Amino acid sequence: MSKQIINTPNAPAPIGPYNQAVKTDGLLFVSGQIAINPATNELINGSVKDEAHRVMKNLKAILDEAKITFEHVAKTTIFLSDMSLFAEVNEVYGSYFSGDYPARETVAVKGLPKNVNVEISMIATMIL
């Protein structure tokens, strides 16, 4: 097994002992992303839709660095601060995919990093 670390300045820098993504054996494992603007390193303040868009843009930047697209995503996990946010986040999330959606689970958790409302992680295939 070989693994390649994927990091890009176009997504928030890791704030702990992890990488933005790891590519191994034809799969890309993308760490959970929150609504941090990588240009300013500041949290996005606004609606949960604004947060969700920033999260998806951060994920896209990592996919771009790995030279793949949302079409390659096989599995996602969405973490929410409250399930009442599901519809708004789902609307934004869905707008980044066309057709063949990945497998997914969505869970509400007691707390998320920096008290954000949404965090999303992904697993993608390097081959279509």
Image: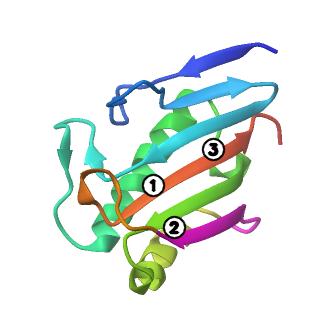
The residue indicated by pointer 3 is: 69
User: Upstream in the sequence, badge 1 or badge 3?
Assistant: 1
Per the model, the C-alpha gap separating discs 3 and 2 is: 14 Å
Residue 6, quarter of the rendered image: top right
The residue indicated by pointer 2 is: 93
For the C terminus, the quadrant is: top right
Frontmost residue, 114 versus 88: 114
Q: Is residue 18 above or below residue 76?
A: above
Left or right relative to 68: residue 63:
left
Closer to the eye: label 3 or 2: 2
Secondary element type, mark 2: helix
Q: Which residue shows up at 43% across the image and 47% down it?
A: 33
Q: Position of residue 92 (x, y in %)?
A: 45, 71
The residue indicated by pointer 1 is: 56
For the N terminus, the quadrant is: top right
Residue found farthest to the top: 2
Q: Are marks 2 and 1 in contact (CB under 8 Å)?
A: yes
Q: Position of residue 124 (x, y in %)?
A: 70, 43
Q: Which residue shows up at 50% across the image and 35% down it?
A: 62
Per the model, the C-alpha gap separating discs 2 and 1 is: 7 Å
Q: Position of residue 80 (x, y in %)?
A: 43, 69
Let me know if residue 99 is in the magenta part. yes
**Residue type marked 1:** Met
Mark 1 surroundings within 10 Å by alpha-carbon count, few (fewer than 14), some (14 through 19), many (20 or more): many
Frontmost residue, 105 versus 74: 105
Left or right relative to 117: residue 40:
left
**Residue type marked 2:** Tyr
Let me know if residue 107 is in the magenta part. yes
Q: Are marks 3 and 2 in contact (CB under 8 Å)?
A: no
Frontmost residue, 61 versus 35: 35
Secondary element type, mark 1: helix
Segment tinted magenta in the rendering = 98-108
